[in-house]
Amino acid sequence: MARFWRAIMLAALGRFEEAHVEILRAWYLDPLSLVIQTNVGFVLFEARRYEEAVERCLKVLEMDPGFALANFHLGRTYLAMGKYRDAVAVLEKAASGFPGAMGFLGAAWAEMGRRDKAVEILQDLERLRAKQYVGPVAFALVRLALGEIDAALDSLEEAFDTHEGAAAVLGVEPCMDRLRSNRRFNELLRRLNLPSLQGGCVSP
């Protein structure tokens, strides 16, 4: 698990080659862990190695078709690739009660031009938040895809203020690429002491 979490940390910092080495070491040490195998795909995803990320997630799903984490990372990879219908189909399998997947699902609907479905996801997230913790990043993903930039940034600042774990990968998250030149977004990354991925390269 130390290797696993070190890989996630390195990926968040944009140190993708080191992250890949560490996650492969974790997999070697625990070869049957579906969580670690799926996160091999996650590290590849953050490095923009989308085809490899898809391949790894699909291999996990061959072993356990209902494994929500693999469906989640596969769906967010399809979203980043612009394969919105595929993203929706996969994320719907992972989204039940899983706010992170719901955020990406809402973003996929918005990218398809289905504003009604995206707004419905936002409403579902609000209802879920009345019962349990729901990280603001999920709201930000949907609002960003809807073109509601200021509202998305408000949600991202809330994620920082509430110490949401998902905020740790904002500097390299592909769905945030349209904010790379945004002043508020880059100020937030500086507050988080995170690098920003610019044009495939990490900027400090």
Image: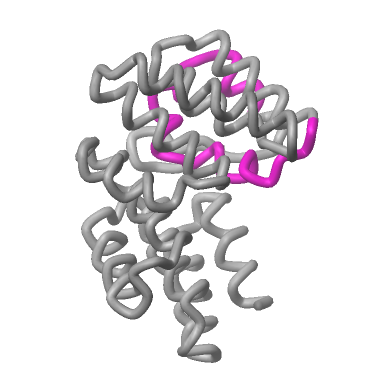
Give the prevailing secondary structure in the magenta stretch: helix
Residue 84 in the image: state x and y as whole percent. Answer: 24, 36
- Magenta segment includes 181: yes
Left or right of 111, for residue 132: right
Query: Where are the magenta residues, as a range?
Result: 162-188
- In percent of the image, x 58 and y 29: which residue is there? 125
At horizontal 47% and vertical 45% (from top left) the residue drawn is: 95
Q: Residue at x 38, y 52 (%)?
A: 93
Please state which of residues 82 and 107 is positioned toward the viewer in this rendering.
107
Q: How is the image coloured?
A: one colour
Tell me how many marks there are.
0
Q: Give the answer, above or below, for where 100 lies relative to 73.
A: above
- Left or right: 199 with respect to 148? left
Quarter of the N terminus within the rendering: bottom right
Q: Residue at x 59, y 32 (%)?
A: 137
| Position of 31 relative to 72 (above/below) | below
Q: Quadrant of residue 180?
A: top left
Q: Nearer the viewer, residue 68 or 194?
A: 68
Residue 139 picture location, percent across and down: 56, 26
